[in-house]
Amino acid sequence: MVQTAVEIARGVRAGDLDPVQVTEEALARIAAADGVVGAFRRVRAAEARAEAAALAARPDLADLPLAGVPVAVKDVTDITGEYAAWGSAAGPRTPATEDGLIAARLRAAGAVIVGLTRVPELCIFPVSDDPSGVARNPHNPTFTAGGSSGGSAAAVAAGLVPVAHGTDGLGSIRLPAAMCGIVGLKPGRDVIKDKEAGWFGLSAHGPLATTTADTALLLSVLADRPEWTDIAEPAAQRVAVSTQVPFTRAPLPRALGAAVDQAATLLRTAGHTVVPAAPAYPLRALGGIVARWFAGPAEQAIGSFDLSRLQPRTRTHVRIGRRAARLVNDRAQLEWQAEAERFFGAHDVLVTPTLATLPLKAQRWHRKPWLANALPSSRVASFTGPWNLAGYPAMSVPIYREPVHGLAMCVQLVASPGGEAVLLGLAGQLEKANPWPRTS
């Protein structure tokens, strides 16, 4: 089994592992499996080898938190010598002349960036395919790896890399993490400040990993919060659990509800107070989410992308988004934040399913019309999107694997702003009490 990021970094710092050899092994795994998994838009083989060799000669190698760790980066951020494609053939192809915040922090910490992972065009939908490939769930390749950080989730779940970077606009880290059975964390608003948050403040950078410890390690580097590396045992928490689908109260598949029940039992056994409770999800909040989902990609596309070369589903989304921009305001967000604050005044943590429907099948979704993408996309993301609008930290954690399709059933943990360490502590307790399979 592939070593964790914590194990690799410890071995490289101690001189027991060679970062060049670690990188070669990761590249070999990618060459052997990515033809099926479809995680990468571009593999940086030559560049990664050169970076690993330079890393091995660094005088501060013994002090680097991610020393020699192969990392995959979502194809949406600046990396020197690379262009960010955003899953599209319609965007600029000018390579970046310097690293953005994410790549700079990864390199400073000693990571080796082995490749850029596949995303849907402009990261609009929770399925990651493009004309060159489909990101698939490594546990069952007939299902999608999710999106929009689907390539990153697939790379981690397949053991191609131990950790990966993602972004989350309405669940784009948590949804693929849940579909692939790994851990994904969306930190609170402005925890990782990289330029201006996309989609009118909805989007956040975050980690995907197979263990809580690796999640904490990568988050600590991306957020420049080294204290988060040490996961503390959480004090007794007031935990609310809910399987009520926000806004619609649609029926929930039994397997997803069973994961919440199992998580509730584990947390109660760990000494936490667990009660059924759910926030009152105001319909105005749904309008605020939908308006930003349309207007955010439209704002990005207009002026930066050749609209005539966008996929048909994206062109439709952008056309609607032009009109939706006037509906983006602070009123819906403030109303929802007030309700979330009231709810978290009585509860410390909320546990829900991560997904509201079972995972979607792996298909050429980019060839389908907009409505065929939008309906299943909006349904599956019902539990995740509200917490982007609120700006609260939220995390997806595997609980069990259903036997029919081999799919992981996961839960979402939500805390109030500043609660990232609490989420990591609870996830660590769940992992210790109920270990999950790390990779396929």
Image: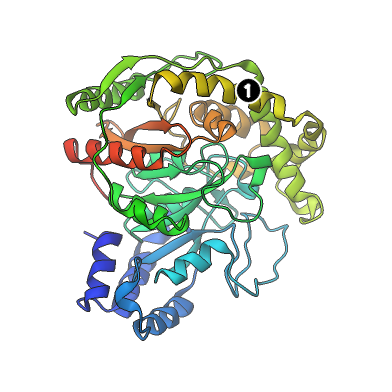
| Residue 214, quarter of picture | bottom left
| Quadrant of the rendering where the N terminus is positioned | bottom left
| Residue 160, quarter of picture | bottom left
Q: Is residue 36 visible?
A: no
Task: Kindly identify the residue that appears in the image at 61 percent across and 54 percent down.
Answer: 87
| Front residue of this view, candidates 345 and 188 | 345
| Front residue of this view, candidates 392 and 3 | 392
Task: Kindly identify the residue that appears in the image at 34 percent across and 18 percent down.
Answer: 254
Residue 334 in the image, given as x and y percentages of width and height: 64, 26
| Residue 257, quarter of picture | top left
Task: Kindly identify the residue that appears in the image at 45 percent across and 66 percent down.
Answer: 106
Residue 292 in the image, given as x and y percentages of width and height: 69, 35
Category of crowding for the residue at label 1, using alpha-carbon neighbours closer than 10 angstroms: few (below 14), some (14–19), many (at least 20): many
| Front residue of this view, candidates 157 and 20 | 20
Q: Is residue 214 visible?
A: yes
Disc 1 designates what residue? Answer: 285
Residue 338 in the image, given as x and y percentages of width and height: 58, 22
Total numbered badges shown on the rendered structure: 1
Vertical comparison of 260 with 314: above or below: above
Residue 400 in the image, given as x and y percentages of width and height: 25, 33
Task: Kindly identify the residue that appears in the image at 24 percent across and 31 percent down.
Answer: 403
- In the image, what residue type sits under mark 1? Ala
Secondary structure under the numbered disc 1 in the rendered image: helix
